[in-house]
């Protein structure tokens, strides 16, 4: 059993060794090694992510056994001195190309939305260990005239010998307000990955938020998808319940022609999920990491007082079924399981180090489905009257209360429990809910009692071997 001084530190999720973590960046596999970069502010910068953020770096041969590699570069240049913001990676030949947004705030009286901010797209090449000089490939003057200063988060890929980049953007309205501006994605193309020209812009038919960030464009299961994070979407009872959203559109039309967006669907309905990014590994698998956190959130994480904050989801394997993307933990995670136990429908299962993995199959034949699962009294997952509900206790939620999803019934659940994180996958990952929560672990004991009240269900539980990623 892995002993931790801080019992809220995680057993099998990537987290910062200290300080602040947010968006996953630069995901790739290169010469057999997986690389996971992320937005990072080390402890000396403060766990709230201030001042300027840079990147952190994990790498390893196994997705569930990555080691922290340190900071690859710092925001020290004139074109990124207020932050090395989010970006992506492309493994090409004998190098990895890293693209990110260099944030610059000019001195003077500015609002930094319509004036005073530079968004510079910067390239750094690496062999995975050594990082080259920074090279700026796009500046504000290279964006459409109707863009605000909020253009960021390059996702780059290479297709049929041509390089492509998508950027998230906020487009000005005549009123120049968040209530009237709209989100958009900018498409660029290049013959060499250095010199870029605008290919087109793409947005929804109806306005859907004032800013689109963290775009990702990919094919899966014979369909094309555009993932993004819209800001400024009004909340509904069963959708868009967070301050900002993360989801994907189905894209119709050709990349180099006219395209339209259809059927926005959220990636995750929980409290803590944002800025997802996908990549294809050397086995052809499409894999996603997301940030278990939220920008500008109205709730907090008590770990900030302990010198660190936030983590990433486990790597999720993506598949597509009838235009719906299914997310499930990569198979490598099952290698961390031990102590398999068949659990009765009304039984309590103890996790002595706060980490576990559960699979629950609800048996057919019951017209009215109603069940609940409690996690140490700190959180509860329940289903009743066609509503899947995740509730976090007041003393464990730090502002988190309830998230709800409307669905007919649940056939299968997989639940990952990791000290202060829950990842819940329903019906082959068509519905996912992720949250931080904070059980009241006593002293040096990390016992977590998971209580099931699931009539007509077959339940299997495992403990998980905790890792130390540092």
Image (tube, rainbow, N blue to C red):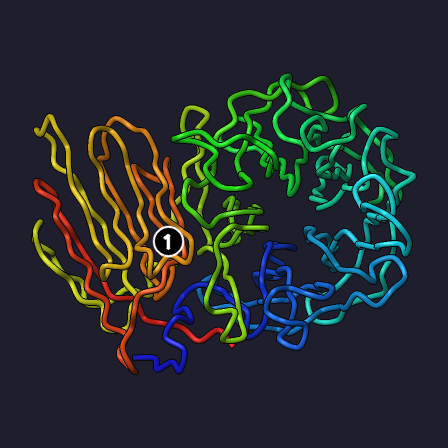
Q: Is residue 10 above or below residue 333?
A: below
The spot of residue 418 in percent (x, y) is: 35, 63
**In front of the other: 94 or 461:** 461
Give the percent coordinates (x, y) of residue 122.
82, 53
Q: In this view, does 456 lie to the left or right of 42?
A: left
Residue at image point 59% right, 69% down: 47
Q: Where is residue 378 in the image (x, y as percent from the top left)?
A: 28, 59
Residue situated furthest front in the rendering: 109
Q: Dot 1 corresponds to which residue?
A: 331
> In front here: 348 or 117?
117
Viewer-nearest residue: 2 or 318: 2
Toward which corner of the image does residue 6 lie, by quadrant?
bottom left
For residue 214, which quarter of the picture?
top right
Q: Which residue is drawn at 44% across and 76% down?
A: 468
Judged from the image, the secondary structure of the residue bearing numbered disc 1 is helix
The one of 79 and 164 positioned closer to us in this rendering: 79
What's the residue at 24%, 54% (across, down)?
A: 358
Horizontal side of 253 relative to 310 (left or right) equals: right
């Amino acid at each position: 059993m892995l002993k931790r001084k801080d019992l809220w530190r995680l057993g099998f999720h990537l987290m910062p060794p200290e300080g602040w973590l947010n968006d996953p960046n630069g995901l790739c596999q290169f010469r057999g090694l997986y690389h996971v970069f992320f937005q990072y502010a080390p402890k000396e910068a403060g766990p709230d992510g201030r001042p300027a953020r840079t990147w952190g770096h994990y790498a390893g041969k196994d997705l569930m056994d990555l080691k922290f590699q340190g900071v690859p570069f710092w925001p020290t240049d004139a074109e990124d001195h207020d932050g090395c913001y989010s970006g992506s990676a492309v493994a090409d030949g004998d190098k990895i190309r890293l693209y990110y947004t260099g944030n610059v705030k000019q001195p003077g009286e500015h609002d930094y939305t319509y004036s005073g901010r530079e968004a510079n797209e910067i390239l750094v090449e690496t062999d995975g260990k050594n990082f080259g000089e920074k090279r700026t490939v796009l500046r504000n003057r290279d964006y459409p005239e109707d863009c605000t200063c909020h253009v960021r988060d390059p996702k780059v890929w290479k297709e049929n010998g041509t390089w492509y980049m998508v950027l998230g953007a906020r487009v000005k309205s005549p009123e120049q307000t968040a209530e009237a501006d709209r989100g958009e994605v900018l498409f660029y193309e290049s013959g060499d990955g250095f010199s870029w020209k605008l290919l087109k812009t793409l947005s929804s038919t109806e306005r859907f938020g004032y800013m689109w960030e963290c775009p990702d464009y990919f094919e899966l299961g014979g369909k094309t998808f555009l993932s993004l994070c819209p800001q400024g979407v009004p909340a509904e009872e069963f959708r868009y319940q967070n301050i900002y959203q993360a989801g994907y559109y189905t894209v119709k039309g050709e990349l180099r022609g006219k395209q339209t967006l259809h059927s926005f669907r959220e990636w995750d309905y929980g409290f803590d999920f944002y800025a997802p990014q996908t990549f294809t590994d050397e086995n052809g698998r499409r894999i996603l990491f997301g940030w278990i956190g939220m920008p500008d959130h109205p709730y907090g994480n008590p770990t900030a007082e302990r010198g660190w904050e936030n983590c990433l989801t486990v790597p999720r394997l993506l598949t597509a079924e009838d235009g719906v993307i299914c997310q499930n933990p990569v198979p490598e995670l099952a290698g961390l399981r031990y102590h398999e136990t068949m659990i009765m429908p009304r039984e309590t299962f103890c996790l002595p180090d706060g980490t576990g993995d559960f699979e629950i199959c609800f048996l057919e034949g019951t017209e009215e489905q109603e069940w609940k699962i409690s996690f140490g009294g700190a959180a509860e997952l329940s289903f009743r009257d066609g509503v899947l509900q995740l509730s976090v206790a007041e003393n464990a939620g730090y502002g988190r209360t309830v998230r709800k999803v409307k669905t007919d019934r649940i056939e299968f659940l997989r639940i990952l429990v990791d000290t202060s994180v829950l990842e819940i996958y329903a019906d082959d990952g068509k519905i996912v809910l992720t949250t931080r929560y904070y059980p009241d672990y006593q002293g040096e004991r990390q016992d977590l009692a998971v209580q099931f009240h699931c009539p007509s269900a077959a339940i299997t539980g495992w403990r998980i071997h905790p890792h130390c990623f540092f």
